[in-house]
Image: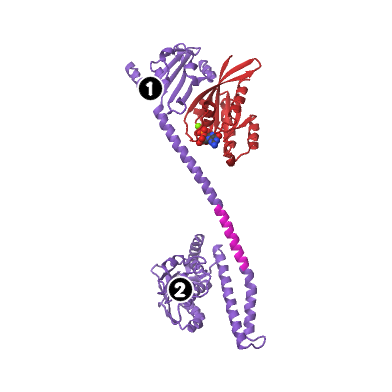
Amino acid sequence: MDPTVAELIVKEHKIAYIVTDYGLKVTDTSPNVGLLLQVNAILLLGKPLIEVIPELGGNETVLLDILRGNVPRFDLFWLNRAPDDQQDTYLSLVILPYHQGLERIVGLTVLIQDVTPMGQIHQLLNQHRDELNSLRNQLLNHNAELNRANAELQQLDDVKSTFISVAAHELQTPLSSIAGFIEMLSDEVYGSVNEEQKEALDIVQRSATRLINIIKNLLDVTRIEAGRIELALRPIDLHNLIETVVAEFRPQIESRQQNLTLNFQTNLPFALCDHTRTIQIIGNLLSNAMKYTPNQGVIELKTYLAEQEGFIRFSVIDSGVGISREDQKLLFKRFFRAESANLTGEHGTGLGLYITRSLVELHGGQIWTESELWRGSKFHVTFPVAGRPTSLQEDHARLRKKGRKHLTTF
Amino acid sequence: MTTINKKVCLLGDFAVGKTSLVRRFVYNTFDDKHLSSIGVKVSRKTMQVSQINGLTGLTMMLWDLADSERFDQIESSYIRGTAGVVLVCDLTQARTLFNLQTHLEDLQQTCPEAKVIVAANKADLMSQQEISPADVAEVAAGFNAPYYLTSAKSGHGIEALFRHLARLLVD
Ligand SMILES: Nc1nc2c(ncn2[C@@H]2O[C@H](COP(=O)(O)OP(=O)(O)O)[C@@H](O)[C@H]2O)c(=O)[nH]1
Ligand SMILES: [Mg+2]
């Protein structure tokens, strides 16, 4: 090698060397060794290696192994030599046998390189990585805590659902028999009743019916939340169904002198829905319209093909109390009652629209509202159009799947 | 009086207090900040150990190894020639106690003869302890090693730990 270049390499890369004899005493050094080791280089000759590089103390066995040819080398990377509380300085040491001729080992060669700049970068990287790691561990711990809390809440929620479901079931039977006997009493099966008694019985009967409806709703909510609602989907003539529901409500609508119009699109295709549950959807919406529209108000039921292909839209439009913008956002949530609905003095549990939305979504449809406070409301629902008979099965499967997906997001 | 050099390594998980133990023992200082280390820093501490035939001077070369890397070729080269090892765990983190087994196995591959002692550190953090002295005793007994509850912060147990190790190294 060109000696000038060799000298340059040694200088620029801050490389120094020490050679020792077989007794580990220094016999030769490069001139820059004093600078790298922070010692006086002139005084090194003849000194024990371990005095020159104290870090090698305790490593005598390794050094002897190298002298004897048992170990080829000893590496010490990133030897941090900074005194305590001072900026790190790093040396890299390689200890090799010093050969005379080809075979004979007569001492050690110690190659020393100052690697401080690289070491400091390496240290910084480690510092950042360790800090990130400890942040990550903190996050993991937080996450685990959140998961635990979540599981506890879920368990409480399950307990609550089970309680509601059991309580509602237990209430249902005695209530049905109460309602049955009241009906027989008013029908004078057990003898005649006077006008005053009849009025009292009517009130009891209405209350019993309301209780039964509340219980039905509670049971529906627990079924919805447990994903236990099964739909029997088949092609259905919606107009027919709407008329059935309207007939049921007719007496109450008339007693309120409300003006009900049906606005049906001709040649509307059949919808793919569950008969009982669709009656429930239409019934809930019509009952709300009736309850929250003043006497002599206007209610319109409308059907048409929806903008979205493959769907039929059914709308209930009323001239009732309306719903404020804030309340609209919460309208389809469990137990929510709009402020304006409360003001009417009508009873309600805040479950009807939640159940309605769940049922509509189980069918694969959507429900939404347009309203302004004191300016009436429009409720829109979409039902899927029944496909050709052959694809009915697939539709069914697809819708069931879709319904499930919605269920999980409640 | 004769003086002998012995190489002592501190092994243990990240942030258990290896660097802090050395600093407390050698310089009698403590820092709340955790500084990641790379490679190795060697500190020296000389003590006198009394024996039947008089006092022996012992210089412990304390090797504080970087904690982040897993044991590999490089670390095995650092460990070569180790006469004694302090296995350090953190009383506030249970897993650091269970990981001592791995650190010991790593060491014994290279230095099966090394004397072993266990330091269960951060004893001052009373309210955060995840492991009891009994747990430490059990693990240490499994290694056939003595153990000390230490605090680099207060200095508790550190002198006793290294004195005990010194006797093991001189005998
Ligand atoms: N309270 C307390 N903190 C400690 C103790 N020993 C170390 N620490 C802290 O624990 C962190 C890690 O210590 P360090 O010695 O750098 O750990 P190493 O990675 O094992 O070298 C630092 O923030 C120290 O201040 C101790 O005995 N008590
Ligand atoms: Mg450290």
Decide if residue B13 is in sight here.
no
| Residue ID for mark 1 | A14
Please name the amino acid that badge 1 sits on: Lys
In magenta segment, residue A88:
no
Q: Position of residue A386 (x, y in %)?
A: 46, 70
Residue at 42 percent across and 34 percent down: it is A124
Decide if residue B119 is in sight here.
yes
Q: Secondary structure at mark 1?
A: loop
Residue A168 vertical placement versus A200 (above, below):
above
Q: What's drawn in magenta, residue-wise?
A: A149-167
Q: Foreground residue, B86 or A75?
A: B86
Q: Which chain is home to disc 2?
A: A
Q: Quadrant of residue B5?
A: top right
Q: Position of residue A99 (x, y in %)?
A: 46, 14
Residue at 47 percent across and 24 percent down: it is A76
Classify 10 Å Cα crowding around label 1: few (below 14), some (14-19), many (20 and above): some
* Numbered label attached to residue A270: 2
